Amino acid sequence: MVSRIDETFGALHGKGEKALIAYIMAGDPDIQKTQSYTYALIKGGADIIELGMPFSDPIADGPVIQKAAQRALGSGTNISSILELVRNIRRAHSTPVILMGYFNPVFKYGAEQFFIDAEKSGVDGVILPDIPLEEIGAVTPYAGKYNIDIILLAAPTSGRNRLLQLSKHTEGFLYYISLTGVTGASKGIDSQVISSIQWLKRKTQKPVAVGFGISTPEQAAMIAEVADGVVVGSAFVKLIESHDDASNDLLAFAHALKNAIKE
Amino acid sequence: MKKSESKKSLPDARGYFGEYGGMFVPETLISALQELERGYNRIAGTPSFQKELRYYLEHYAGRPTPLYFASRMTADLHGARVYLKREDLAHTGAHKINNTVAQVLLAKKLRKKRIIAETGAGQHGVATATAAALFGLECEVYMGDLDIKRQALNVDRMRLLGAKVIPVYSGSMTLKDAMNEAIRDWVTNVETTHYVIGSVAGPHPYPRMVRDFQSVIGKEAKGQIVKLEGRLPDVLIACVGGGSNSIGLFYPFIGYKDIELVGVEAGGLGIETGRHGASLTAGEKGVLHGSMTKILMDRDGQIINPHSVSAGLDYPGVGPELSYLKDAGRLKVYPVKDDEALSATVYLSRKEGIIPALESAHAIAFAMRYVPKLPKRSLVVINVSGRGDKDMDIIREHIKLGG
Ligand SMILES: Cc1ncc(COP(=O)(O)O)c(C=O)c1O
């Protein structure tokens, strides 16, 4: 089945464009704001929206997203309120929405129930950073049944055979982590990462999007040379952290990023 | 006593003990965990590694530790004969050294240059810093800010040993948060760094590896009790934080179905108050720090900040093998409250002249309740996992020591 994420990458490919995937934390600072921020990002040119589901112990995240998760939990955010938010977004937009979060809240909600309700709300894909290929059996039966893409992560430490396996099993696209580290680190982009993505692109048809340490239009442009999409997260979250209403800044920054990856 | 035929050994190839365990970690760490597992399988079982490890455990760490017949405690409790496995006498003052010397030795063979660890009570941090000094590796230890304050002595010990202690200010500022931060460091520096997890928690292969390294406790105890009493014990009692001292004592006895295994958890202010660290008693199945196990969570699956007077038991999860043994009915688990543990500290100090760690005092407190109910000829072994010097500030705060 062709998912909305597949269609988005297909359409962009047809236009010779790359995808801007914008991540913000759902419920940071509250669910209402997340809705307006999502609209701002879409208006600014985001092709796919990735909403973080907050967790108390986010082991793959740096301080910026850790704090966003704390703010989101502080505002009472949980899976139910996030699914309702997606339902509302769906009424206004057909932009694909991906939920990204740690497994325990999903497991507690009930893995199958989560995918049933996610499909009903119009969620297109799910990224679970603490579910590697080894544990994917915990979700694939349901994801397949309820038409949600499970997007797998690949890392600079994934060997070549593993990269091939990951790109075979991932749905929608492969999310390539651009650095050995947690989200939001600013290590710069390693030339080895670039060559690894180039290698992967020769081996697989699946779109590859790159994220974790990308915070400027220049870095985004560099990645867009080789990949099909760019994920920007912490940089958006920082704007939210430092503004009472970040809508205009989010729109402008999304716009700048989208322009940078068009060229 | 008969040993029942052991079924297939656990964990399975995927790191599962029944439905618990696994490798719930970010992709970045998978290659390192696989490398560690391969390295462990290749190296740890070889005669030369075993010989080298035995050398350090004996000549450096002070093993075997005694199994001491607690005669005054036995007389006082009017029940079973009580033996204490004296891990408090191991170098650095707790069982943690068994694991750190072994892991750091393995890390050195895997050519890692840098060692990191998380610590709660500071005992694992001290033991890791010690092993790093012994083998000449760089060492950084993550420790929650609350624990830095309540285990100040161990912070100074780690620094004296040349380790860097990095305060963690997130969450409850205790062990769980230190572990989050250590995992983040490992995600970032995985190529050069070995992460010495201090308990049988975490992703596969840690629960198995740490269990195997800590099993020296039970192996020794088995030989010692047979020598002293001519037979195996009836009851084993140990405190459970992440589960390493308990599984270390229990593991060689698991196949003997008639031997009762008792894990004692942090009851904190009481299970009913919600302020405790009793993941086996009050937790539910979920994923924390890389494994499926029993954890303390709220109805949205967010981890609950635990509470215990003892920093080493102040943890919202537990090793997956203990969750498995509990569900299988092989392991009995009881909570012991803060005040009971404090009283037991005084009791053991005055009855036997042994100041236990507050963690170990939980096991003593349970024994004080249970031993009187047992027949006179039955044999009980309690693991005194560590000594209490590190806890003097807390003890002073809670107890009038008198003139
Ligand atoms: C003396 C002592 N006992 C017990 C524990 C609890 O850990 P575990 O359950 O892994 O033995 C600790 C942990 O810091 C400790 O220092």
Image (tube, rainbow, N blue to C red):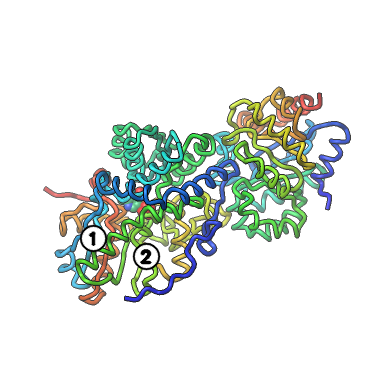
Q: Residue at x 44, y 48 (%)?
A: B43
State the image coordinates of residue A96 (x, y, percent, origin top left): 78, 44
Q: Residue placed farthest to the front in the image?
A: B47
How far apart marks 2 and 1 lie (CA) works out to 19 Å
Judge whether A194 appears above or below B279 on screen: above
Q: Which of the two residues, B304 or B330, is positioned nearer the viewer here? A: B330
- Location of residue A213 by image quarter: top right
Mark 1 crowdedness (10 Å alpha carbons): few <14, some 14-19, many ≥20: some
Q: Secondary structure at mark 1?
A: strand
Q: Which residue is mark 1?
A: B84
Q: Amino acid at mark 1?
A: Leu
Q: Residue at x 70, y 60 (%)?
A: A141
Judge whether B134 appears above or below B302 on screen: above
Judge whether B97 appears above or below B14 on screen: above
Q: Which residue is mark 2?
A: B334
Query: Could one spot residue B281 in this view of the protein?
Result: yes
> Is circle 2 on the same chain as circle 1?
yes
Mark 2 crowdedness (10 Å alpha carbons): few <14, some 14-19, many ≥20: some
Judge whether B316 appears above or below A223 on screen: below
State the image coordinates of residue B290 (x, y, percent, origin top left): 53, 50
- Answer left or right for A233 relative to B288: right
State the image coordinates of residue B138 (x, y, percent, origin top left): 39, 32
Viewer-nearest of discs 2 and 1: 1
Indicate which disc, 2 or 1, sits on the residue closer to the N terminus: 1
Quadrant containing the C terminus of chain A is top right
